[in-house]
């Protein structure tokens, strides 16, 4: 990495400065948590990444413990992929402190990457090679002996259910198959930490569930997972803990249940009135919910007891066109924290 | 599926240190070779066909006319004069081509470089491994070319064999800076420009087909400054055994400096595109 970042010496020096001043602070206050614990595979404090004037990641703190499935949730452009590239020991942080597997990614990149598995946002398989050849050559990049790679490749192809396509070229494979192959490839070095950048974006429901199943198995085997997603169901399915990122900052952190508990109510009552009436009706219903959100086509009443609220609405003589009581989801949290407006 | 559970933990939970960092450039070279295995036949055919066509058309047919004119000051047949020039020019083309689309493809279209950099392989390994593969391509292609030259009686043996390393060096002097160029331009329109304003004019005017002193006086310094002229001069000098040591030292230094500069620029540009 030192060579790789030949012209980055100025930058890494500034990281060192930060480290020094931070440890001074610790000496003065005696507060702990200034260095990663033994089981913290990813540890970041005040992590920043800028590209020219644009700040992609704006001072975030992260801790991912061994065996955990940790998620970055956020809209496009929230800084998730930039964070992943820094955790992957590819892109050097602009500022802040970062340790991966207890090592400094700026100076020990290759040693860190030897123990990581990376599933990028867009598949970067070698299209001109066969499925198996993709695994064989990728293992070589890790310096693994050929005989060992062959054995692992067979196991991994079995694991991702691609054994019968082993000798086919990659190019004609379906999106789901390519994704599974990319996951198999990321496991060729038996990584301790697996980074997945939007693992199921663009896949059909069957392929997504097949992929989740494989990831769940990996987690059971003790592989630590770090993933980004903008799918709430994916986050709820896979993540023990997650952070919601927005505009380069962490907007919230916790388990899916904790986040729902903190940022939403237990249930949501959705009411649909005639066109144009939603806004006027909202005023009269404010007392029935902790929070009301007015959307162009419906009202969302955040409350712990949706049925009771629905009954109260009817008792007030209102006749909405449709009434729906549902449990609060991560999606409600997500939209509350990151807003409903489109981010491009 | 029971087998999934059976082969679970040991490898996946072990906390082993990496087993000594791998020689990344070797793996990159291996990867390129694995890709090449799929299309080596086509490249062999063209590496035989091209010298045959050029030597027959230019060397023999055109050469007969030239030899009648008798203006060539090297005192050899035009075919013998032309062949080492074409050898160096072929090296230029091979080195250039292998550094254009393959680099842009791996960098931008298929993003295979990004995948490789997620492993312990470093940017400098990518550049080195890539150039090693081009070295392989140059040696094989130019060896075939030499064999064709011998078949045409255009090779002075054994001294002419020394032309091979000189031509290989010429090819690398293009491959390295063009790799940097390929990582610098945003799309393949840049390659068309490179071909039109760089490679083709050099091919025509840098001494491959006629001595540069035949050019109008103003253009001569331009031709002498091109990398192909240095490659042709060195290759031809060795092939014909009439090397001027001083000039050869200048040619050699020029070509080596260009390779070094190219490697440096390529690493820099790869870092910009892939890492930052």
Image: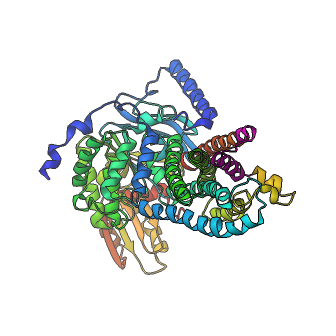
Residue at the location (60% across, 66% down)? Answer: B54
Seen from the viewer's position, the closer of residues B165 and B199 is B165
Residue B243 image offset from top left, x and y in percent: 70, 43
Residue A329 image offset from top left, x and y in percent: 34, 58
> Is A188 placed above or below B200 here?
above
Residue at the location (45% across, 64% down)? Answer: B42
Is residue A126 visible from the viewing direction of this image? yes
* B228 magenta-colored: yes
- Image: magenta residue range: B226-250
Seen from the viewer's position, the closer of residues B97 and A313 is B97
Residue A342 image offset from top left, x and y in percent: 52, 64
Name the image quarter holding residue B15: top left
> Is B23 placed above or below B49 here?
above
Seen from the viewer's position, the closer of residues A206 and A297 is A206
Residue at the location (34% across, 30% down)? Answer: B17
Residue A117 image offset from top left, x and y in percent: 36, 44
Indicate how the structure is coloured in the image: rainbow
Name the image quarter holding residue B64: bottom right
* B169 magenta-colored: no
> Is A89 placed above or below B236 here?
above
Side (left or right) of A150 relative to A22: left
Residue sitting farthest toward the left: B2
Seen from the viewer's position, the closer of residues A152 and B238 is B238
- Classify the position of the C terminus of chain B by image quarter: top right
Tally of numbered tags: 0
Is residue B272 visible from the viewing direction of this image? no
Q: Main secondary structure of the magenta part?
A: helix
């Amino acid at each position: 990495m030192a060579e790789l970042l030949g012209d980055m010496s100025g930058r890494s020096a500034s990281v060192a400065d930060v480290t020094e001043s931070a440890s001074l602070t610790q000496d003065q206050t005696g507060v702990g948590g200034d260095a990663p614990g033994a089981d913290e595979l990813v540890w970041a404090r005040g992590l920043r990444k800028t590209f020219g004037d644009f700040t992609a990641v704006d001072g975030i703190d992260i801790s991912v413990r061994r065996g955990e499935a940790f998620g970055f949730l956020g809209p496009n452009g929230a800084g998730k992929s930039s964070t992943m590239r820094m955790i992957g020991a590819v892109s050097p942080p602009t500022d802040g402190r970062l340790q991966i597997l207890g090592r400094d990614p700026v100076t020990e990149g290759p040693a860190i990457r030897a123990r990581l598995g990376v599933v990028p946002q867009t598949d970067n398989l070698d299209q001109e090679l066969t499925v198996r050849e993709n695994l064989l050559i990728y293992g070589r990049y890790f310096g693994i002996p050929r005989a060992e790679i062959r054995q692992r490749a067979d196991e991994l192809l079995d694991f991702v259910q691609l054994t019968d396509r082993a000798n086919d070229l990659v190019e004609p494979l379906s999106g789901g198959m390519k994704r599974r192959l990319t996951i198999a490839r990321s496991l060729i070095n038996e990584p301790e930490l697996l980074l997945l950048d939007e693992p199921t974006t663009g896949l059909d429901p069957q392929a997504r569930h097949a992929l989740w199943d494989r990831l769940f198995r990996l987690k059971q085997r003790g592989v630590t997972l770090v993933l980004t997603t903008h799918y709430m169901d994916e986050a709820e399915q896979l993540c023990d803990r997650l952070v919601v990122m927005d505009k380069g900052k962490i907007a919230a952190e916790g388990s899916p249940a904790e986040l729902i508990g903190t940022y939403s109510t237990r249930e949501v009552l959705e009411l649909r009135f005639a066109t144009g009436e939603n806004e006027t009706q909202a005023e009269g219903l404010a007392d029935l919910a902790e929070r009301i959100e007015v959307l162009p086509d419906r009202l969302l009443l955040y409350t712990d007891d949706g049925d009771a609220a629905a009954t109260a609405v009817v008792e007030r003589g209102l006749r909405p066109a449709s009434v729906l009581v549902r449990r609060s989801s991560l999606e409600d949290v997500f939209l509350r924290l990151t807003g409903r407006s489109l981010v491009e | 599926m029971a087998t999934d559970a059976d082969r679970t933990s040991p490898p996946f939970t072990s906390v082993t240190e990496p087993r000594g960092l791998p020689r990344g450039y070797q793996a990159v070279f291996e990867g390129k070779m694995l890709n090449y295995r799929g299309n080596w036949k086509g490249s062999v055919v063209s590496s035989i066909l091209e010298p045959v066509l050029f030597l027959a058309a230019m060397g023999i047919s055109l050469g007969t006319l030239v030899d009648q004119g008798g203006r060539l000051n090297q005192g050899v047949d035009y075919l013998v004069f032309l062949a080492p020039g074409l050898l160096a020019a072929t090296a230029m083309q091979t080195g250039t081509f292998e550094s254009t689309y393959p680099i842009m493809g791996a960098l931008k279209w298929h993003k295979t470089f990004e995948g490789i950099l997620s492993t312990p392989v470093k940017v400098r390994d990518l550049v080195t491994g890539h150039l090693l593969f081009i070295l392989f391509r140059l040696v094989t292609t130019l060896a075939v070319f030499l064999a064709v030259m011998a078949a045409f009686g255009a090779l002075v043996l054994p001294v002419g064999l020394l032309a091979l390393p000189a031509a290989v060096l010429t090819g690398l002097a293009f491959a390295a800076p063009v790799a940097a160029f390929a990582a610098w331009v945003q799309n393949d329109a840049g390659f068309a420009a490179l071909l039109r304003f760089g490679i083709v004019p050099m091919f025509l005017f840098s001494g491959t087909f006629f001595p540069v002193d035949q050019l109008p006086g103003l253009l001569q310094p331009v031709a002498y400054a091109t990398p192909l002229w240095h490659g042709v001069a060195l290759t031809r000098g060795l092939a014909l055994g009439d090397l001027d040591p001083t000039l050869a030292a200048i040619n050699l230094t020029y070509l080596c400096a260009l390779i070094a500069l190219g490697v440096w620029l390529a690493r820099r540009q790869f870092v910009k595109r892939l890492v930052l």
